[in-house]
Amino acid sequence: MSARERDVVVIGAGQAGLATAYYLRRAKLDFVLLDAETGPGGAWRHGWESLRLFSPTRWSSLPGFLMTGGPDYYPSRDEFLAYLTEYESRYALPIERPVRVSAVCNVGERLAVETDYGTWLARAVISATGTLGAPYVPHIPGLDTFRGEQLHSAEYTSPLPFAGQRVLVVGGGNSGAQIFADLLDLADVTWVTRYEPTFLPDDVDGRVLFEWATERFLAAREGRDPSSIPSGGLGDIVLVAPVRAARDRGMIVSTRMFECLTPTGVVWPDGREEGVDAIIWCTGFGTALDHLRPLGIVAADNRIAMTGTRSIDEPRLWLVGYGEWTGFASATIVGVGRSARATAEEVAAVLG
Ligand code: FAD
């Protein structure tokens, strides 16, 4: 087998790729991970400096290796990055980076994985590229005319560049709440949301959300009514320490959406124009599947028809970690293990 031929190529070495690799290694498969980043951590490398996970250590751990810190400890971004770095070396995962995959193509018996560093051939491909590559910004009149700074939450790192500026943080989810709280002491910041944001109770965190989701999943699978089990959608805001502190100071206030942008600011629903220096869009992500388009299996809604984590129309392709449509809770740290394991077991069975 040549250096560029593997039984399995995993695209992406964020948490989903690493968890999958853990099980591929256990199955003794021949594989490589190709990752576009310059170092470990996937999307977490792009989190803001003060970011704290809303899931305590046990719910922030990948298969086989429990994070340290105790059951009630919420890791920081840097601690989680250090954990992922250690995970890679602990299991000696074969990761090539920075390597960006541009296309996966059907070339007969194999799939060709084309990259900026040449082509790999594989009998099976597992895509675990996450959502960071598809930041979503809503189409609002005047968006292109605004001459101030605009950035997506995926690009936000620190409040310091915004000191003294008039800033709007747009988006009523966890990122919006946390970035708003991060800016409060340094900038003249307003939190803009389409609806009044929903906050979870103080004692509900990632662990409780995951337990509720698991109960609903099991109830649905066993034919019981899941509606009696609390939900708390992923859009509901977890009161992580900085958001809770801002709430306790009475600072968490939100304003409804502006009507349009102007070259220098925004127009509010009452017709008032206001100058703004910067807008931070905390409006979520789509799914970055462009590298899979040459296979002709990405539908108009940017989804791929799946059974479990396996593509129906290209059965040599699996997808791990994108969200519920590729596996229950697969876009969470603790949840991705289940999809990763099922995928590796299926790939091992198919490759024999
Ligand atoms: P990623 O981390 O995005 O990894 C994908 C990797 O693939 C990246 O390294 C990327 O560079 C690479 N890649 C992409 N395209 C290509 C390509 N074409 N070629 C090669 N490589 C490519 N979950 C929790 O469980 N607990 C939390 O507390 C929590 N907090 C969160 C806070 C925020 C602000 C956000 C946004 C999410 C949070 N999540 C949390 C959700 C989830 O854990 C993350 O979204 C997670 O990073 C997804 O991991 P992933 O491996 O699927 O994707």
Image (spheres, grey):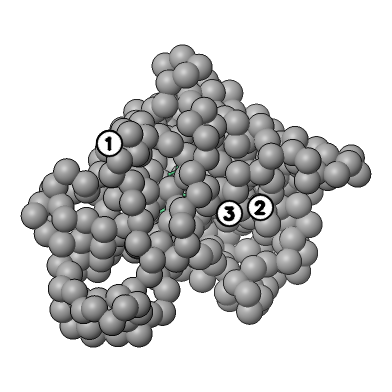
Q: Secondary structure at mark 3?
A: loop
Residue type (three-letter) at the residue carrying disc 3: Tyr
Residue type (three-letter) at the residue carrying disc 2: Glu
Question: Spatial distance from mark 1 to mark 3, Cα to Cα?
Answer: 36 Å
Residue furthest left in the image = 164
Q: Nearer the viewer, mark 3 or mark 2?
A: 2
Label 3 CB-ligand 1 distance < 8 A: yes
Residue occupied by mark 3 = 322
Residue occupied by mark 1 = 249
Q: Please identify the quarter of the rendering in which residue 281 is found.
A: bottom left
Q: Nearer the viewer, residue 73 or 276?
A: 276
Q: Could you say where residue 296 lies in the image, as x and y percent from the top left? A: 65, 77
Q: What residue do we see at 85% from left, 44% from top?
A: 225
Residue type (three-letter) at the residue carrying disc 1: Arg
Residue 324, labelled with which disc?
A: 2
Horizontally, residue 120 falls left or right of residue 231, namely left
